Image (tube, grey):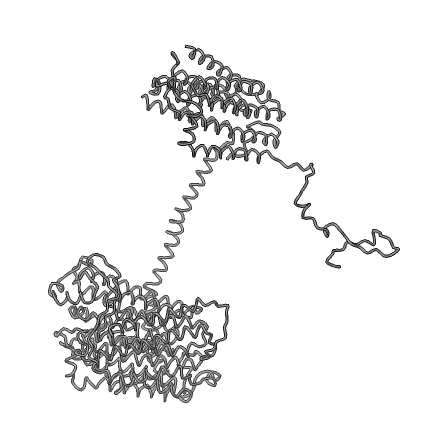
Amino acid sequence: MFYSITLTHILTLSSVLLVLGLVGIVLNRRNIIAILMCLELILLSANINLVATSHFRADLAGHIFTFFILTVAAAELAIGLAIVTLFFRNRGDIEIDSADRMRG
Amino acid sequence: MTHLPTILILLPLLGALAGALTYLWPTGAKRRSNIRTLEHSNIRDTIAMATTTGSVVLAAVLAWTVFLSLWLGGGAASHVDWFTWLNAGPWQVTFGALTDKLSATMYVVVATVSACVHVYSIGYMHEDASRRRFFIYLSAFTFAMLMLVSAPNLVQMFLGWEGVGVCSYLLIGFWHHKESANAAAMKAFIVNRVADAAMLVGLFLLLQTFGSLTYGDIFGQLGANTAALMNAVTPLFGYEVSTLSLAALLIFVGAMGKSAQFGLHTWLPDAMEGPTPVSALIHAATMVTAGVFLLCRLSPLYELTPDVLHIVAYVGALTAIFAATVGLTQTDIKRVIAYSTCSQLGYMFFAIGVSAYPAAMFHLTTHAFFKALLFLGAGSVIHAMHHEQNIFRMGGLKTVLPITYVCMWLGSLALAGIPPFAGFFSKDLILESAFMAPGGWAQPVYYVGALAAMLTAIYGFRIVFMAFEGAFMGDEKVRSHAHESPWVILGPMMPLAAGAVLAGLLLSPMGTLEWWQGAIVISHHHDALHAAHHTPAYAKYAPLLLAICGIAAAWYLFAEYRNIPRKLASVLAIPYAISLNKWYVDELYDLAVVRPTRVLAGWLYRFVDQEGIDGLVNGAADATKQAGQALRQTQTGHVAHYAFAMVMALVVGLGLLLWRVMG
Amino acid sequence: MLADILFLAFATAIILGAGTVVLARNPMVGVLGLVFTFLNAAGLFILLQAEFLGLLLIMVYVGAIAVMFLFVLMTIDIDFVKLREGMAAYLPLGAVVMLALLAELLLAAYAAPISGVGNPIGEGADTSAAALGALLFTDYNLPFQMAGLVLLTAMVGAIVLTHRRRSDVKRQNIAKQVLRKPEDSMTLTQPKVGGGVTASHWEPQTVEEK
């Protein structure tokens, strides 16, 4: 099917995606919505890894795990956005640095 | 017939359990009692008293049946196995009932006195709100005592031994609202614990030597390889000590504690804090004689350890004279009788010391009757005088308490050893045996015993004369209320009075070795008992003469010329002080043991517990707190920091993984 | 050959989309970048014979999650530009760490033993939704149920967190209405004949007193 593309190439793609997601978190470190979006990128990179490995090893288990990651990502996002809404309603902003009341 | 001993042992237990079951009866439901035997009684108390007293009376009847069938009916000693408690390889502990002349005699003594005391307590304790508890304890004690004497092995014996200790503790502290009663109960328990520790070591030594604690096994081995066992040695503090002697000595120390011999006697006078029936049953007739019984039971062992027997004799003689001198000056009627018990136990032990075990058992039996009688009589006086125990606040009571007066006379005559009362036969036999002990080594013991016999007569009749003769010395109001006790109190004293008069005559065969049918073994090397028949007349009658002199002196001093003792006390100030303060033994112990222990405990509390152990615990808590304080600084609350930590962990972790996989 | 070209196209698109998400000044643009990324990722999944997952990705991410992002963004009135201030403060440190991580990941991808193990799924292999379902409902049945519970929890949690009772809206309390009794709201009086009913005269009376 693939002529010259191997697992390594796809892993490279997912590595780049992961690092991009992390860089996004660093750059948008005050904007919680952007951070949530970058988290989705990170999870996607993991999914790509799993699906690719699954493909190259002819094992459906990777698909199953992707499925669960999708589920958890959806749940995480629902709660996360609910918290953002609540946070905004209470504080009037979504700046993440102002949420530091749990400090020791 | 073979199960009669089992039944008689278990009866008091069943009575106590049935009595205890009444506590399950809801207290809210106050039913009208139809059985109006006693005033203040409610039905639960009545049930408890009926089950306990009934079972013990029945046990007494059975005990006499067993005893008489063994003695007159020609029955043989029997042994019933109940169940095997421990089965540890070659060592087994099988509970059961060994019924020979020795235990049958004890059945009779224990069950009879206990039955009398139970009935007596119905009258004596009728004002007490928690008398139900009292009766249950009494029956439980009776069961434990019967277990002790019926045991076929030393383990069951020890179980009974500790059982009577616990019941004694509970009964001394029965009036637990009195602080002195609590202190006395604890003292009795702790002093006995010291003795029991020694005894346990002795039992372990026997177990190690014989591989069994069953009497039959031990005596069998003693008979089979006597020489080897007598040469066996045990290392002790760098010396080699004869194993048998050491074991016998340690068990004797245990017996000293239970039987209040000099050194470990301090708990017995204090135990008089308990109700008087308890003093009569436990601290006069039965429990305190357990040590004598045990040594008689182990006579085959003690016969092989003459050196220990000498110690027993000297300790017994010392106790006899010590307690007699102290008894002279005490003012509390019960304490005088308690010291007299101590003294009489001393007689029994020196009888054992000269190998006259039958004489010791004989004296044990007669003593149980007349001493219980004296205590119950004293209880009757105390009851009539509204809990006045000081004989210097009594006097002239013979018109008020005529029946009690007669009983006290009978008991005191028996105690003083005047024929034909019970004490004469047994005490005489003991003194003669001491005089005639082979080699004459025990003659000093004889002289001490004879002197103690005179003192016994003096202090015995001092009570009688101070309380019943002369003029009344107490509060007039008390005297006007004083009255003869009801028959439920006087009744149980009658069998005991009969025993005090007749036991010596009727049971005199007890004083011979043959009567015991092998339950007691005496080596023919020191057969003092046999030689006692050939006692010279002066030695035979000197104690009697001394006792009569003692009674006469008591009459002179305490009935006729009551101011002479006071003058004597001021002239002989130092001996008087020593006697009055019980030879300062309590003070010595306080100084030598109690105070250093307190100081040590205080020091340990202050420095080891508070600073050492608490410091350790608090230090651990403090360290945790400090660590937490330091660590909480790392929790900045900024999400970015946590995220950075996670990423760094990922970088470092992945780096390590790669390094390990590829490097 | 076609597959290789398609992979390269999808990969490039994914990187571009992700870059948009990371760098977008306007979060709206960011969300659209996210949608674009996920669409291409779905294409990649289908290329890797994970058709079901690819479609699921479109449905879940594009259909639900992206919409949810947009929804939240629109309800929140905030100056997103201000949030980007001081954005580059941690960039030097971040860049070093990120480059290190990327290097490690690439090292792992290229040199570690996992690469080169190739046993691709053949042409006729069954990777359909049916095959996935057969696995999911048998071997992974319990985790599957747990996933359902996770979603339920998330749903309930989101509702609990965001739901609020407004005090300025009148509501109907049916239970209260049903339980109303005459004595709660009615007073029986006996006015004097000819006196009329006046305020001074009127006293509330309970039925029990009658």
Q: Which of the pair B558/A94 is nearer the observer? A: A94
Image quarter of the N terminus of chain A: top left
Task: Determine whether, in the image, residue C26 is placed left or right of residue B447.
Answer: right
Task: Determine whether, in the image, residue B96 is placed left or right of residue B483.
Answer: left
Task: Determine whether, in the image, residue B430 is placed left or right of residue C181.
Answer: left
Q: Which of the pair B427/B129 is nearer the observer? A: B129
Which residue is painted at 40% across and 51% down in the image? B610
Percent of width and height locating residue B133: 41, 70
Percent of width and height locating residue A27: 52, 20
* Residue B645 in view here: no
* Residue B605 in view here: yes
Percent of width and height locating residue C154: 52, 33
Q: Which of the pair B285/B556 is nearer the observer? A: B285
In the image, residue B629 above or below residue B280? above
In the image, residue B519 above or below residue B461? above
Percent of width and height locating residue B28: 50, 68
In the image as oriented, which residue stretches furthest toward the right?
A: C194
In the image, residue B464 above or below residue B18? below
